[in-house]
Image: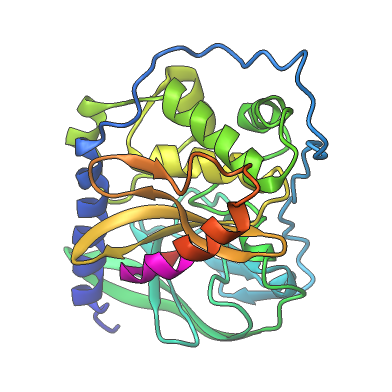
């Protein structure tokens, strides 16, 4: 039995929870209407048909123990599946990337299958599963190294995962199709999704006061309730955009010295636009309110160069 690296756990939990609690200050998301947009007379030239990629655990390649199952059959698609079937009530899964960035997740003890991304692209990843012994002491249940060769670099940010979960039946996906109907470009679609979410979801102050570090968003619940914390906003926007074939990263990191969250998207002919939708601890903001203008490419490149103060720590 080996002690789990509790310092990294404590740091992750404190930092991530702090990032969530910073969102209490959210002020730019007013509006309570849950009405769907009227797009009956507005049809853009962009194909707004949803495309939902579905993770598969088909057991073509499975690693683990009697209690731990890691399905690594689709590493080339940018994800793996994991489940725990043992007696421990607290289980952690850690993924260490080729750049030695450590991602720590909760693995449910009910045997449910969870999907995790290979966020750092192709390369070697260390995957470990740890069960709680007492307090902050964890024992190593299983460890392995996985070699990943992605089919393309965008797949981890098109598939759903534990933090950005959705299926073809998710209400938010059908809504996204309606919301982006007027779009002519992917940039238009990003702006439309941003406008809809920030005007139809209000900040949940009570939830922010009680949120736990292991909290996971439910995008449809956010829509139904019309309320959420910043993690809910970001996951909802990411799910909607991914279903519209726009690679989208939910990112957590630092803007200057403050810990924040933002969204980056891949735009054809431009590349990754880092922080296209940002949360600065007070407001959500869109990169530019005139994305569809003829000057959009010039503005995008200026925005990218101006975003150097944003330092990403985690990608989901």
Q: Which residues make up the magenta segment?
A: 304-313
- For the stretch drawn in magenta, what is the main secondary structure? helix
Eyeballing the image, is 277 above or below 218?
A: below
Give whichever of 265, 217 is nearer the camera.
Answer: 265
Image label count: 0
Question: Whole-percent x and y of residue 52?
Answer: 74, 45
Residue drawn 66% across the image and 58% down it: 267
* Res 89 visible: no
Q: Using the rendered view, name the quadrant where residue 131 is placed.
A: bottom left
Verify whether residue 173 appears in magenta. no
In the image, is 191 to the left or to the right of 256? Answer: right
Question: Whole-percent x and y of residue 62?
Answer: 69, 73
Residue drawn 40% across the image and 53% down it: 262
Residue drawn 22% across the image and 27% down it: 205
Q: Using the rendered view, name the quadrant where residue 44 is placed.
A: top right
Question: Whole-percent x and y of residue 218?
Answer: 48, 35
Residue drawn 77% across the image and 14% down it: 41
Give whichever of 165, 265 is nearer the camera.
Answer: 265
Q: Using the rendered view, name the quadrant where residue 168 is placed.
A: top right
In the image, is 164 to the left or to the right of 297? Answer: left
């Amino acid at each position: 039995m080996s002690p789990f690296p509790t310092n990294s756990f404590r740091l992750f939990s404190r930092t991530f929870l702090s990032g969530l609690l910073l969102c209490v200050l959210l002020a730019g998301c007013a509006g309570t209407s849950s009405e769907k947009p009227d797009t009956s007379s507005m049809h853009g030239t962009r194909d707004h048909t949803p495309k939902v990629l579905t993770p598969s655990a088909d057991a073509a390649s499975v690693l683990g123990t009697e209690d731990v199952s890691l399905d690594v059959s689709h590493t080339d698609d940018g994800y793996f599946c994991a489940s725990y079937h043992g007696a421990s009530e607290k289980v952690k899964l850690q993924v260490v990337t080729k750049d030695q960035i450590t991602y720590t997740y909760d693995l449910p003890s009910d045997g449910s299958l969870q999907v995790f991304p290979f966020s750092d692209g192709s390369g070697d990843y260390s995957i470990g599963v740890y069960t709680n012994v007492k307090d902050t002491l964890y024992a190593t249940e299983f460890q392995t190294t996985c070699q990943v060769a992605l089919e393309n670099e965008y797949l981890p940010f098109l598939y759903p995962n534990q933090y950005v979960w959705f299926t073809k039946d998710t209400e938010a996906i059908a809504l996204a199709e309606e919301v982006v109907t007027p779009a002519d470009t992917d940039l238009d679609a990003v702006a439309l999704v941003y406008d809809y979410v920030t005007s139809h979801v209000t900040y949940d102050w009570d939830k922010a006061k009680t949120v736990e570090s292991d909290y996971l968003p439910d995008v449809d619940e956010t829509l139904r309730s019309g309320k959420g914390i910043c993690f809910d906003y970001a996951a909802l926007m990411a799910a909607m955009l991914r279903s519209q074939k726009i690679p989208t990263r939910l990112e957590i990191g630092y803007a200057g010295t403050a810990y924040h969250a933002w969204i980056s998207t891949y735009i054809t002919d431009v590349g990754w636009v880092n922080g296209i939708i940002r949360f600065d601890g007070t407001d959500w903001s869109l990169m530019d309110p005139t994305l569809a203008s003829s000057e959009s490419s010039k503005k995008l490149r200026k925005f990218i160069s101006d975003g150097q103060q944003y330092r990403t720590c985690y990608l989901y």
